Image: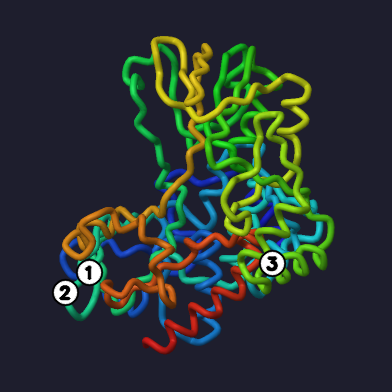
Amino acid sequence: MTLEAITSQTLKQGVHPPEVVPQTGTQPNTATTDATTIPIIIVGAGPAGLALGYQLKRRGLPFVIFDQYGPGATWARHYEHLSLHSLKPLSKLPGLPMPAHYPDFPTGAQVHAYLAGYAAHFDLPIQTGVEVVSAHHDGARWHLETTQGVFQSHLLIAATGIWNGPVLPKLPGQDTFNGTILHSHDYKRPQDFAGKRVLVVGAGNSGTEIACAVAKVAEATGLAVGKRGILMVKYPKTVLGSRLTSRVLRGLPDHISGLLLRYVHHDFADLGLPLPQHNLRYAYPVVGFDIVDAVKRGTITTHTSLAQFEGNEVVFTDGGRARYDTVIMATGYRPALGFLEDALKDVYPEPFSTLIPSSLHNYQLTKVPNTLFFGYDYPESEAWLHRLPEKSGQAAKVISDLC
């Protein structure tokens, strides 16, 4: 079956339910007593796990990818109007372009279909319906407790992404707030908020997109920008321009690239959308100026950081307050590594997921044996998918040297 046929079929069928059987590779192990040994186990069949699987297969290394649902399933669980912010040719995984009929900025559903087709095209050994519940290291190898039995492995690779690790801050008065509070993880479509008074907290790509979509149907829409500010960039137009821009920014000293970015980008502080005060080299950009247009039209009201809740009102750090009945927290994610927390609590008393990716060296933490963490670093100067082919090759080289 061609990639075009596979992606078309996946788009028609949608995401599989949790009880899905494996789509590719071998059947899940159902033994509950004897552990099955697999030399290399990758946890997660998202873009990172699939790209790394491709690189390992090219090198002839024995591995299996575990995933609870299926290849790229997370992309079918985002909000319905999600689309990539990076151009299609720069967003492909190594070895296989996206279908020719895809638009320049594919939708989340199209990315899901592409990832499912990628796994099938390269016949990657994926076992779906397998959730890794916990893991421990005995000094020689990893032992994984899963919903499909016990497995052991010489090398464990975490590629679980961040989708299952939403960060929901706890604010004063939150428990007595008269309205509804949800994370953007659980937001699906703007129609669910028709006639509501909605505050979106967080001015990243998700927060601004959700606010702009909800503003079309809500009674009132607000955006709590936060003290970090917002760096907005235009949608990329050409592959060459995108590559050149990212290489120039990566090649310049950090303080020079930060000054250059501040010089070329307009500050919309008068609209409540100020540029970040820190070095813009480290500010993750929001793609597109839809939020600027919406604020200018008056369909979105900007606020400073959310400070607390009081009855049916929210209070902001500048002392302002407003009535909202729904608050959508677009407050980000952290690496979804809960299955490793018990194994590493003695080595890292604090939640070690907060160390990822800042403490990684060659995709490893020094105190964690025989483990790689892949796909958790998000470059500021370009889209995350742009460098995945390069980084997956680097990680595969590290794995090959360890084996």
Q: Earlier in the sequence, mark 1 or mark 3?
A: 1
Can you give x and y, in whole percent of width and height, for residue 238 in the image? 84, 61
Indicate the position of residue 305 as horizontal and vertical percent values: 50, 30
Check the image and report above or below for 238 versus 315: below
The residue type indicated by label 2 comes to Asp
- The N terminus sits in image quarter: bottom right
Q: Report if residue 31 is visible in the image.
A: no
- Going by the numbered disc 3, the residue's amino acid type is Leu
Front in this rendered view, residue 369 or 68: 369
Amino acid at pointer 1: His
Image quarter where the C terminus lies is bottom left
Report crowding for label 2: few under 14, some 14 to 19, many 20 or more residues within 10 A (C-alpha): few
Q: Which mark is residue 249?
A: 3
Determine which quarter of the picture holds residue 144: bottom left
Q: Secondary structure at mark 2?
A: loop
Under circle 1, the secondary element is: strand
Label for residue 138?
2
Lateral position of residue 185 relative to residue 343, left or right: right
Nearest the camera: 247 or 317?
317
Which residue position is annotated with label 1? 143
Q: Is disc 2 in contact with disc 1, using a CB cutoff of under 8 Å? A: yes
- Whether residue 270 is visible to the viewer of this picture, yes or no, is yes
